[in-house]
Amino acid sequence: MTSHALVVIGSRTSEDKYGVESGQRVAAALRERGWTAPTLHAREGKAILKYLFQSPPDVVVPVGFGPPCEDGHIFALARMAGLPCAGPTPASGSLMQDKSALSRIVDALFSPDSQVRSPRGCVVARNQSAGERDRQIRQLQVPPFIIKPCFSGSSEGLEVVHTYDDALTSVAEMIDREGKIVIQEFEQNIEHEISCTVLDGPHGAEFLPIVELRRDTSAGRNDSFVYDSDRKFGPDSL
């Protein structure tokens, strides 16, 4: 009997394009191995629900960056339908999505002398007045600052600003769209970006090979403060 997987692709965020492309590749890889692997976009909530109950697959595979795949919502739907699902639970997924909450957990888990600390910063929200946001940002030390959406990844929306006024302008342009923004002091150039994947298998945790994203040090490409989305996913990415 042919194995059957529903691959949920994309997201409701600016990272949608990465989830669509990655999800289509996952579905293609499953089909190459003899699986039936239809895809549905993460925005198609009603269609996903209908599929889970009327044509239940053997497994659900959410492949998206951001809600509702990465934050565990698809996982919850699959479990409600009694189906196994890849990816994080809603509790862990939602926590990992919130950069401000995760920063507090990192600082609580590791002692101050461990050198494992989140950068000093603040969080501003849509329901704050412009004056409140101004006061929080000006309490930070000397720029530059890194500004990023609280709930998006893949470096989408990430900016490096060099003055308080630029920080305030960037926040004003982003706040209505994102709702919550993290501003952090830029402490040092990013020398290494490491990805460590852990699978929860039937025999316990399985650690996949560690992957490092390396900086391009060729002429004209060594002056960037951070890995922006173009350097991660663009035509010149490594």
Image (cartoon, helix red, strand yellow):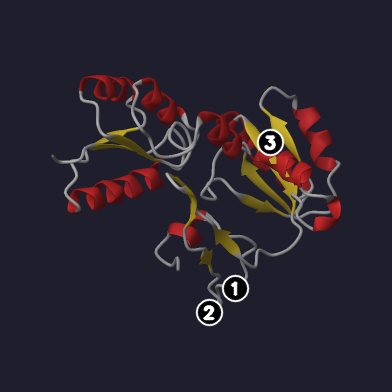
Q: Secondary structure at mark 3?
A: helix
The picture quadrant where one finds residue 69 is top left
Residue that carries the numbered disc 3 in the rendered image:
101
Callouts 1 and 2 close, C-beta under 8 Å: yes
The tag on residue 222 is: 1
Residue at far front of view? 203
Mark 2: amino acid: Ser
Q: Residue at x 19, y 48 (%)?
A: 31
Q: Is residue 143 above or below residue 12?
A: below
Label 2 Cα neighbours within 10 Å, binned few <14 / some 14-19 / many ≥20? few
| Disc 2 versus disc 3: nearer the observer | 3
Residue that carries the numbered disc 2 in the rendered image:
218
The picture quadrant where one finds residue 41 is top left
Q: Position of residue 90 (x, y in %)?
A: 52, 29
- The mark nearer the N terminus, 2 or 3, is 3
Q: Secondary structure at mark 2?
A: loop
Report the front residue among 90 and 174. 90
Q: Position of residue 26 (x, y in %)?
A: 30, 49
- The C terminus lies in which quarter of the figure? bottom left
Mark 3: amino acid: Ala
Residue at far left of view? 1
